[in-house]
């Protein structure tokens, strides 16, 4: 444990301070040198680095993120043919013999050709091949995969629940292997200043996280979500939001998915999609007559509510359900919101849990499928100005688990040389940091701290994405930095 941090600079031009840490809490903050702090291995000399509260990623799918880092990445493909070529090239250099070949990251919304089973059959015909879309709301199968997963008709492209049913069966690695992948992903997150995540993996998460903590996982605070298909089981086990279960792991919200996604053209909208051949307005996966009773049951059982809503019609229906419930919660994504619905977030006590990097990934597909409406797409500035509480996340594996990427996207609305995507919706770095943290650098707060080498208030968007992190502390214990590296080296010596 770290006993003190010396000579750290708070943001905003303040003079350096010393922090005393005790039992995982900041017990004192004073001007540098004012406290009698002896040196030692349990004292960090920040040497003038900037100190921030530990960062949170408020929306992660941790198992999928850990797996996706080892799957074939087709995210750069600009056509079905190019995606197939990337897979073909990757297979030429791989020696794995898994029954199912898995790739991730395709975005077909602007492709000039159609992803079909026959395109993938030309790559490999004797093994099942599954490509998962970047938004995780669709999967693309070759013919062998269609047979394996019992898909009897169609062109090999599955959306929403049919796609989720396939992805849930792709955990070919053992629990031991996946847990190691999760441990590595968590260590990488800590290296970016992350101290906590909300894990909304679409599975029964309790057993996974109990097993991981039992195996020594201690890199992050974790709140894991529960889905409607597991609500009876959760209630029977007396789970409720906020309940600690092991180490720094606790029960998170009840997650309900009410519509699809933009790239899959299933986000439920008030206006039709151009040239839609099916689901012209998107796909409403939980009708209003079922949503509010489900939310009421979850709330009565002690669960906070996290409602996935991307299209403007889905957001309106989710807000209507919160209004009838008379209790707030969270809307996950809130990507397209009607002007008249913006004030309802604050009025109803509904947090907007948003993922700013999605706007960078989706700016062109939004212009294509939400024509004339992108001025109210990813409306961060409008949400904050309306009084809504906004928190930031990645939705990893949809975007990388790295809050600095989200902060950059939220404040610049661009990640390259292009003009900002509706720059009027940008928020300040200070606002983005506040939306990425849950504590303060103050006495009585958790000793969740990040020491960084540069002042984010003075950095441009490109620099923010590669913010140099020197130390991360969770409850006063180093999870990234020289002390952790020394422990790792000693363990492997």
Image (cartoon, rainbow, N blue to C red):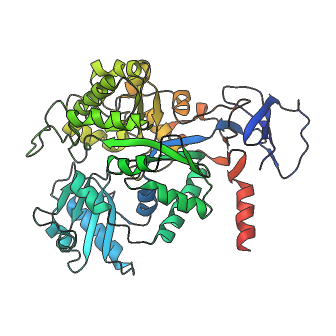
Q: How many numbered dots are placed on residues in this image?
A: 0
On screen, residue 280 versus residue 177, left or right, reads left
Residue at position x 41%, y 20% in the image? 346
Location of residue 215 in the rendering, given as x and y in whole percent from the top left corner: 60, 65
442 vs 50, nearest the viewer: 442
In this view, 104 is above or below 366:
below
The answer to whether residue 375 is visible is no
In this view, 334 is above or below 125:
above
On screen, residue 79 versus residue 487, left or right, reads left
Residue at position x 30%, y 24% in the image? 324
200 vs 125, nearest the viewer: 200
Location of residue 351 in the rendering, given as x and y in whole percent from the top left corner: 43, 29
The answer to whether residue 93 is visible is yes
Residue at position x 18%, y 59% in the image? 157
60 vs 110, nearest the viewer: 60
Furthest-front residue in this view: 236
On screen, residue 420 versus residue 190, left or right, reads left
In this view, 338 is above or below 354:
above
Location of residue 24 in the rendering, given as x and y in whole percent from the top left corner: 72, 42
Q: Quadrant of the C terminus?
A: bottom right
Location of residue 448 in the rendering, given as x and y in whole percent from the top left corner: 66, 41
């Amino acid at each position: 444990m770290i006993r003190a941090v010396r000579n750290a600079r708070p943001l905003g031009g303040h003079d350096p301070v010393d922090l005393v840490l005790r039992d995982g809490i900041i017990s004192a903050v004073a001007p540098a040198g004012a406290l009698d702090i002896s040196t030692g291995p349990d004292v960090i000399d920040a040497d003038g680095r900037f100190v921030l509260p530990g960062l949170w990623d408020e929306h992660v799918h941790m198992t999928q993120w850990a797996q996706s880092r080892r799957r074939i990445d087709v995210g750069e493909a600009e056509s079905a043919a190019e995606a197939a070529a990337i897979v073909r090239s990757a297979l030429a250099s791989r020696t794995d013999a898994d029954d199912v070949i898995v790739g991730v990251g395709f975005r077909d919304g602007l492709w000039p050709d159609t992803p079909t089973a026959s395109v993938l059959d030309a790559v490999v015909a004797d093994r099942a091949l599954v490509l998962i879309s970047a938004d995780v709301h669709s999967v693309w199968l070759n013919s062998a995969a269609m047979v394996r997963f019992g898909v009897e008709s169609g062109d090999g492209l599955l959306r929403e629940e049919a796609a989720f049913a396939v992805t849930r069966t792709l955990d070919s690695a053992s629990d031991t292997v996946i847990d190691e992948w999760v441990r590595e992903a968590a260590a990488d997150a800590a290296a970016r200043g992350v101290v906590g995540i909300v894990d909304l993996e679409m599975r029964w998460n309790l057993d996974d996280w109990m097993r991981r903590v039992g195996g020594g996982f201690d890199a992050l605070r974790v709140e894991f979500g529960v889905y409607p298909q597991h609500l009876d089981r959760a209630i029977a086990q007396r789970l409720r939001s906020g309940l600690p279960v092991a180490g720094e792991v606790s029960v998170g919200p009840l997650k309900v998915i009410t519509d699809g996604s933009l790239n899959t053209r299933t986000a439920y909208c008030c206006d039709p999609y151009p040239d839609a051949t099916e689901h012209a307005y998107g796909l409403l996966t939980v009708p209003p007559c079922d949503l509010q009773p489900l939310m009421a049951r979850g709330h009565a059982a002690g669960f906070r509510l996290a409602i996935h809503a991307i299209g403007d019609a889905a957001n309106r229906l989710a807000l209507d359900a919160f209004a009838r419930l008379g209790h707030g919660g969270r809307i996950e994504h809130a990507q397209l919101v009607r002007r008249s619905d913006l004030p309802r977030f604050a009025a109803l006590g509904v947090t907007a849990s948003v993922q700013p990097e999605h706007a960078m990934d989706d700016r062109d597909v939004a212009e294509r499928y939400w024509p004339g409406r992108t001025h109210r797409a990813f409306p961060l500035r409008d949400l904050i100005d309306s009084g809504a509480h906004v928190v930031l996340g990645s939705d990893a594996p949809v975007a990388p688990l790295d809050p600095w990427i989200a902060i950059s996207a939220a404040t610049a609305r661009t990640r390259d040389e292009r003009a900002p995507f509706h720059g009027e919706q940008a928020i300040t770095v200070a606002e983005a940091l506040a939306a990425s943290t849950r504590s303060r650098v103050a006495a009585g707060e958790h000793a969740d701290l990040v020491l960084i080498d540069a002042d984010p208030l003075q950095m441009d968007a490109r620099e923010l994405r590669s913010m140099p992190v020197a130390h991360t502390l969770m409850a006063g214990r180093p999870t990234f930095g020289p002390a952790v590296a020394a422990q790792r080296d000693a363990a492997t010596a």
